Structure formats: C-alpha cells, structure tokens
Image (cartoon, helix red, strand yellow):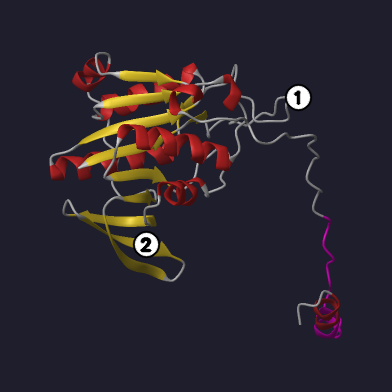
Amino acid sequence: MNVVVCVKQVPDPNSAGQLDPATHRLKREGVEVVLDPGDEYGIEAGLQLAEATGGQVTVVSMGPEKALDAIRKALAMGAAKGVLISDEALAGADALTTARVLAAAVKREGFDLVVTATESTDASMGVVPQLLAGLLDVPALTFAKHVEADGSTLKVNRQTEAGYDVIEADLPALLSVTAGVFEPRYPSLKGIMAAKSKPVDRIGVGDLGLDGVGSGEEVVSVQPAEERKAGEIIEDDGTAAQRIVEFLAAQKVI
C-alpha cells in the first residue's frame, strides 16, 4: 500500500500565539515551530497501515523551507520519502488553495491511501481533508478513532458525539484520524540518522502544473473579541424564581 501522509509545521501550540501586525496573520518567523501534534497520529497511522500491507509512506508538506524540519521528523519516525512544496506565492494560502496544491502533489506521487489529521492546531478549520478527498475524487473516512485495512478496503470507527459509526470503503481513499487512534512512536537514534539520507523533493507551484494559484485571501483587519459582560446576581427574596423565568423569556431561551 502506497500511503501519502499530509503534515504541517505550526507555531508551538504550547506557546502564546502572536499576530503579525503587518499581515494580521499568525506570526511564524522568530517563534518556535513544530510538527503539528495532530499530524504525529496521522504519521503513525500511515506507518502502521503501510507496514501491515508491505507498503511505504511518503510525507507531503506545504510551507516555507523551515517546514523541512517537520518532514525530517516524519522520516525519522519511519517514512520513506518527503515532498516539500515551498513557494512564496502560497504565503497565507486559504484552505481551498492548500487543498488544491496538496491534491496536485499527492497525484504526482501516486497513492492508495492519503492520511491527514482532522485539523491543524494553528487554523483549526477542519475542512482540508474533505476538500482534498473531493479534489482527488476518493471517499473520505473522517474522524477515525480505529482503523483496519486489508490492502483493498479500509474500515474505520468514525468518532461521533454519541459514540462511533462503522464506515468501510474501497481504496483509494482518504483517512483523517483523531488523537489516540495510534500512539505515535518516538524517533529512534537510528531513525534520526537514517532520515538524513532519505530523499526529499523540493518543488514549487510550477512543478505541479497549477496556474493562477496564490494565497486566495487577505486579512484586512483584526479586532479584539468583545469582553464578556458581567452577569446579574439574583438573591432569593421570594421572587428569584419568577425573575429568572422572566430573564430566560427575554433572552428567548424559553
């Protein structure tokens, strides 16, 4: 099974995020950046599925040159190859543009299965996996908390608010995983050393045959969120229940 795992380098989620005053976007220069923690579960899922079916994992990432560090970590975990799509035209790319570029890169590599996290920790939009599946014209098995594969079909337990749904689809397909689907392995010293010699392709938009692809959006301003107003304290003098009912009715809650 040829597995492609999409990963992203993000500002460290354990640090306070900062906005660039010029672009109004999340600041990425001069801050600690890491492989998105959610992507570690995707890498582990891809590795286990590839190992069980005699395949290999290719890791694809879109970002600046610095994103190579995220790819190297995936290679140290066991992936066989990396692909970095780095192009100034993609700075600040929106979700659809990101999905278009990733889809083109995935098609270029060839795949039986594409694996992603459910969402990135910097944007938290959660739409790229579904967009990617649509552009690749393959079924999307999303929010997987358990995965089984036999080389031709994929079966997952899809996490829901009420429990989980059991979903099955033929390959090729796209899989997005939740945290805990598999426990990510730690890169071994041997793996870290081996990662230095594994192939990494560096490509741009032109190499993917895409025309007119750019960031797609502009953030014109950012305003602080409105502070929560102080609540009203009602002391029970015998009329508290009635006052609460009147307040809820005024808010159209009841």
Q: Is residue 72 left or right of residue 1?
A: right
Horizontal and vertical percent for residue 143? 41, 56
Which residue is more in the foreground, 172 or 54?
172
Does residue 11 lie above or below 3 as drawn? above
Which residue is more in the foreground, 80 or 87?
87
Residue at 28%, 47% in the rendered image? 182
Does residue 153 lie above or below 98 as drawn? below
Residue 93 on the magenta segment? no
Figure disc tally:
2
User: Mark number for residue 10?
Assistant: none
Q: Main secondary structure of the magenta part?
A: loop
Horizontal and vertical percent for residue 132? 45, 46
Residue at 37%, 53% in the rendered image? 138
Which residue is more in the foreground, 221 or 84?
84
Residue 238 on the magenta segment? yes
- What amino acid is found at the position of numbered circle 2 in the picture? Arg
Q: Report which quarter residue 225 is drawn in.
A: top right
- What amino acid is found at the position of numbered circle 1 in the picture? Pro
Instruction: Tell me the element at label 1.
Output: loop
Which residue is more in the foreground, 7 or 190?
7
Q: Is residue 147 left or right of residue 11?
A: left
Tell me the quarter of the image containing the N terminus.
top left
Residues packed near mark 1 inside 10 Å, few (<14), some (14 to 19) or many (20 plus): few
Report the residue marked by disc 2.
158
Horizontal and vertical percent for residue 161? 46, 67
Bounds of the magenta span? 229-244
Instruction: Tell me the element at label 2.
Output: strand
Does residue 219 lie above or below 236 as drawn? above
Residue at 81%, 49% in the rendered image? 227
User: Mark number for residue 21?
Assistant: 1
Residue at 58%, 27% in the rendered image? 90
Q: Earlier in the sequence, mark 2 or mark 1?
A: 1
